Amino acid sequence: MREIEIKLRANNLKEVESKLAEKGCVLSEPISQHDVVYSLKGSRNEFQSAQEGDIVIRIRYLKDSAELTLKQQRSNESDNIECETEVVDPKQIHHMLELLGWYPAVEVKKIRRKGKLGLYEICLDEVERLGTFIELEKLTDENIDAEEVRQELFKELESLGLSRNDEETRGYDTQIYQLELNK
C-alpha cells in the first residue's frame, strides 16, 4: 500500500480539534508512541539526503503492543510504500534486525490522537523535542499520481483553516536526526 501524507506545523491543536468536531470527526484518546528507527549498517543517508527507493525500518512501541513498519520512499519523505505488522516479541525483532545489519539510529516519542476525516486518516501529534503537528494521509494504490493526492489533501486541510505555508516535508525521524547533528 502507498501512503501519501501532508504534515503541517500546528500552533493550536485545540482549534483544529474544534473544527474537526464540526465536521463529525471523532478523535481517539491520546496514544503514546515510541518509535525506534533503524538504518542499514549505520548509514545516515536516509536522514541527510533522502532519495527515492530509500528504506526505513521502524519498531513502534505502544502501551500494550508493538508494530514493525518498513517504508520505501517514493517521490519524497511523505510518499512511501508502507508495510506494517504487529510484533509479538520486539526484542527478537530488534535482534533479527541487528543480525541483518540494521541498527537503531533515531528515536521519536509522541502523543497522537487520530481519527477518520472522510477518506483520510488525520493525526494530531505532540512530538517530544519538535512541537505540535497535524498529519493528513491517504492510503492509495502504488501507481497513483502523488501530486494529485497532495493537492487533494491540501484542499481538505485548507477547509480546516490551515495553510500549506506550514507544511513540514521532513519526517519526525529526520527532524530529530538533524537536531542531534546541531547539538
Image (spheres, rainbow, N blue to C red):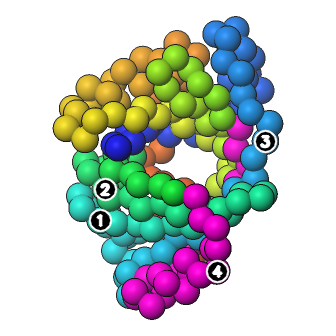
Residue drawn 58% across and 31% down?
122
Instruction: Classify mark 3: residues with Cα within 10 Å, few (<14), some (14-19) or many (20+).
Output: some
Labels 2 & 1 near each other (Cβ < 8 A)? yes
Mark 3: secondary structure: loop
Q: Give how far apart the Cα atoms at labels 4 and 3 are.
A: 25 Å
Looking at the image, tell me whether mark 2 or mark 4 is earlier in sequence order. Answer: 2
Q: Which residue is mark 2?
A: 73
Labels 1 & 4 near each other (Cβ < 8 A)? no
Mark 1: secondary structure: loop
Mark 2: secondary structure: strand
Q: Give how far apart the Cα atoms at labels 1 and 3 are.
A: 31 Å
Vertical order, 97 against 58 (above or below): below
Q: Which residue is mark 4?
A: 91
Looking at the image, tell me whether mark 4 or mark 3 is earlier in sequence order. Answer: 3
Say left or right for 98 vs 23: left
Vertical order, 175 against 91 (above or below): above
Viewer can see residue 173 = no
Mark 4: secondary structure: helix
Across and down, in percent, residue 24 comes to 67, 11
Quadrant including the N terminus: top left
**37 in magenta:** no
- Which stretch did the figure color magenta? 86-113
Comparing labels 2 and 4, the label whose residue is closer to the camera: 4
Q: Residue 76: which numbered mark, if any?
A: none
Looking at the image, tell me whether mark 2 or mark 1 is earlier in sequence order. Answer: 1
Instruction: Classify mark 1: residues with Cα within 10 Å, few (<14), some (14-19) or many (20+).
Output: some
Residue drawn 65% across and 62% down?
66
Instruction: Classify mark 2: residues with Cα within 10 Å, few (<14), some (14-19) or many (20+).
Output: many
Q: Which residue is mark 3?
A: 30
